[in-house]
């Protein structure tokens, strides 16, 4: 078996496993904050609590090294959000990200993720954006920011128009809101947890267990 074939097989396996985990677990925790140390602590706690899908904000200083550091601790299902360019997507993938959440509809990001076999959730809000993301080949639509656009009612509206599209509400949200999204037909939910604005992030992470 050639090295190139082995790498392609591995990428395909990672991609398929990521899809399976998202469909099974349905919660992708997205962590942001000013301190890599706080992100490390929160991600490790989330993993110990039972969350396998954890995304790190690309805007965090030193995110590339942070991803590699977390992988060395045994975390293998890390992704990245706040990706705005194809170059950022490439950097995140090379650092080990298994899924990518973008900030907007970008053909280059979607193509990069498809080429590298990485799960892509493309941020969209309007019906036109949602369909364009789907038409370009995004794995799912990240309804971002879901709460500011209309929350549950907007998700229900979009699902009524596009029942075939997998929608992942993405925003700061409570465990109750996450459960409501899932009951309304969301493919999964992606709660954003700002570690600098939450007094007890570990308690909040634990509360999302009830939603799973």
Image (cartoon, rainbow, N blue to C red):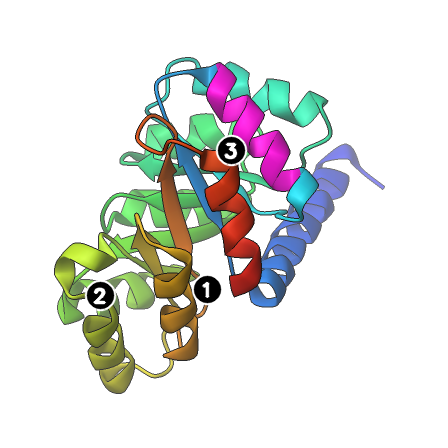
Res 200 seen here: yes
- Secondary element at tag 2: helix
Picture layout, residue 71 above or below residue 65: below
Q: Which residue is mark 1?
A: 188
Q: Which residue is mark 3?
A: 93
The answer to whether 194 appears left or right of 78 in the picture is left
Q: Nearer the viewer, residue 141 or 15?
A: 141
Q: Nearer the viewer, mark 1 or mark 2?
A: 2
Whichever of labels 1 and 2 marks the residue nearer the N terminus, that label is 2
Query: Does residue 111 belong to the magenta stretch?
Result: no
Q: Which residue is mark 2?
A: 151
Query: Does residue 41 belong to the magenta stretch?
Result: yes
Label 1 with label 3: CB-CB less than 8 Å? no
The answer to whether 71 appears left or right of 86 in the picture is right
Residue at 57% x, 56% y is: 209
Q: Nearer the viewer, mark 3 or mark 2?
A: 2
Label 3 with label 2: CB-CB less than 8 Å? no
What is the span of residues highlighted in magenta in the rendered image? Answer: 37-47
Rendering coords of residue 116 (x, y %): 53, 43
Residue at 45% x, 20% y is: 63
Q: Residues within 10 Å of mark 3 (few under 14, many from 20)?
A: many
Label 1 with label 2: CB-CB less than 8 Å? no
Rounded to the nearest angstrom, the CA distance separating label 3 from label 2 is 30 Å
Rendering coords of residue 197 (x, y %): 30, 30
Res 137 seen here: no
- Secondary element at tag 3: helix
Which circle marks residue 153 in the picture?
none
Q: Nearer the viewer, residue 178 or 186?
A: 178
């Amino acid at each position: 078996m050639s090295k190139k074939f082995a790498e392609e097989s591995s990428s395909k396996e990672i991609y398929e496993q990521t899809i399976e985990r998202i469909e099974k677990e349905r919660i992708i925790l997205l962590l942001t904050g000013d301190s890599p140390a706080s992100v490390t602590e929160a991600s490790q706690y989330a993993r110990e609590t039972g969350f396998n899908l954890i995304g790190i904000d690309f805007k965090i200083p030193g995110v590339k090294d942070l991803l590699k550091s977390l992988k060395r601790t045994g975390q293998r299902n890390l992704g990245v959000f706040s990706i705005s360019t194809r170059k950022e997507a490439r950097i995140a993938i090379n650092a080990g990200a298994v899924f990518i959440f973008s900030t907007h509809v970008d053909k280059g990001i979607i193509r990069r993720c498809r080429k590298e076999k990485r799960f892509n959730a493309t941020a969209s809000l309007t019906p036109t954006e949602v369909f364009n993301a789907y038409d370009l080949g995004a794995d799912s639509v990240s309804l971002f920011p879901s709460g500011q656009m209309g929350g549950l009612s907007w998700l229900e509206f979009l699902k009524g128009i596009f029942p075939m599209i997998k929608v992942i509400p993405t925003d700061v949200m409570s465990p109750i809101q996450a459960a409501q999204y899932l009951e309304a037909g969301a493919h999964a939910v992606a709660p954003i947890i700002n570690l600098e604005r939450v007094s007890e992030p570990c308690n909040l992470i634990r509360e999302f267990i009830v939603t799973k």
